[in-house]
Amino acid sequence: MLQKVLQYIDTHQLATADTRILAAVSGGLDSVVLADVLHRLKFPFAVLHCNFGLRGEESDADELFVRKLAKQYDAPFYSEQFQTQAFAEQEGISIQMAARTLRYQWFEQMRQQLGYDVIATAHHQSDALETVLLNLVRGTSLAGLHGILPQNGNLIRPLLPLTKDDLYDWLVTKRLAWREDSSNESRKYNRNLVRHEVIPVLKQLNPNLEATFTSTLERLQGAEAVFQASFQETKAKTQRQENGATYLSIAPLQTSAAPVVLLHELLKPFHFSYSQAQEIAAAWDGLSGKTFASPTHVLVKDREDLVITPKPLEKFGSISVPEETTELRFGPYLAKIARKPAEGYKVPRSKDVAALDADLVKFPLKLRPWKEGDWFIPLGMNGKKKVSDLLIDKKVPANLKPDVWVLVSDASLTWVLGQQLDNRFKVTENTQEVLEITVTRS
């Protein structure tokens, strides 16, 4: 099996021996095989794990399992806890869509911050079949018919030539442990319904369904490549970047052969649906200022352009702060980070400056909005205090509480920004180096 995966990686030019890979590992069967295969093929990789907080202690146990797995492979480990339910409710989308959106945004954020080349996911041949069937049910474009590609931007899928049975056989042969997600058996999720009810019926009609499907995909991918060649020409004439926003010129789209189809292709990276593309196209000749929103972006119809800007999703996760960071923008804030010798250092009195013992913090640090249940040990005290109680004591107005952020080292809250430092990380006479963080509104 290793040779089959390696040949697939080489054929599709997914990675070379020195490609730095971030592996998405949930702890389930598929992702455990991904980590094991990358390890045995000697690719340099780190492990990314998402804790969506949807299954309580079971989710936490998954995270602990993956942390131990990464240690077993001597791979760096990075995890994130998301407020998935809150994000889904805010955007009016399914839990699955919310988890997917938050997951991939964080993956790319970590890839850029840590300097890795690609992100590997454990999608396999059976996943690709399920995806196409779901796309057909929902309605899809040509791209939706070819399913999951070997590579999509910075995402690679090295296990695509394998079936679910192949992965299971590998785990049994190598005696590898994995975590079973109890939600995988629930028929309330569409993918599980397709997996457990639809595909078995289709296999009665064609026992070689996966092989036939793979052959069909090759032809569909070829047709997609022809379409993409023409689409990229249109994109070059239509799309530009300015000051963090994406601009789409309306005029070239209006005169194209299939305006709505091309518009939807341009909008897909920003998670707008085809029905939204139809609504936006219908507004081309209307007044400026009309606004449309996807789970991740906002689009405003201007006079000659469609202007797209990202939504701030940090409050549903966190921002990683690598050790080499000296300046970082997050939410409405700008953080400046410096290391200073402890000798002769005077701790600033400003509430917007945190002076931490550099030897006591663990990178990467995390910045995120506070949430219910957060606690810390206030400076000068020994007992715990909830952040919610601190904000009440400080008389922070209710409408400003959502703007309060916290700094986290490993699992410990180190600073409630602009409010209070944690006593465990303060500068003392034993401190050798100070980590000074200054935060201002940008």
Image (spheres, rainbow, N blue to C red):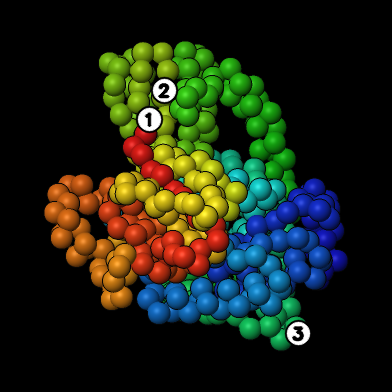
The quadrant where residue 203 appears: bottom right
Q: Nearer the viewer, residue 332 or 22?
A: 332
In this picture, is 228 found above or below 84?
A: above
- Give the number of the disc on residue 299: 1
Q: Which residue is mark 3?
A: 173
Which residue is identified by label 2? 306
Q: Is residue 91 visible?
A: no
Q: Position of residue 350 (x, y in %)?
A: 32, 46
Q: Residues within 10 Å of mark 3 (few under 14, many from 20)?
A: few
Q: Amino acid at mark 2?
A: Leu
How far from the left and from the top, in percent, is residue 244? 47, 29
Report how many numbered discs are placed on residues in the image. Answer: 3
Q: Are marks 2 and 1 in contact (CB under 8 Å)?
A: yes
Specify few, some or many for label 1: CA neighbours under 10 Å numbering under 14, 14-19, or 20 or more: many
Tell me which corner region of the image, top left, top right, bottom left or bottom right, holds residue 423: bottom left
What is the CA distance from the residue labelled 2 to the residue labelled 1? 6 Å
Towards the viewer: 287 or 366: 366
Q: Residue at x 55, y 61 (%)?
A: 432
User: Is 427 left or right of 154, judged from the image as shown?
Assistant: left
Residue 226 occupies which quadrant of the picture?
Answer: top right
Decide which of 349, 369 is in the foreground and name it.
349
Q: Is residue 294 above or below residue 365?
A: above
The disc, 3 or 2, on the residue closer to the chain's N-terminal end is 3
Q: Of the residues shown, which amino acid type is indicated by label 1?
A: Leu
Q: Is residue 36 visible?
A: yes
- Tag 2, which secondary structure? strand
Which quadrant of the rendered structure holds the C terminus?
A: top left
Across and down, in percent, residue 119 comes to: 64, 54
Which is more toward the observer, 34 or 184? 34
| Outermost residue, front side | 344
* CA distance for labels 1 and 3: 51 Å
Residue at point 52% right, 59% down? 358
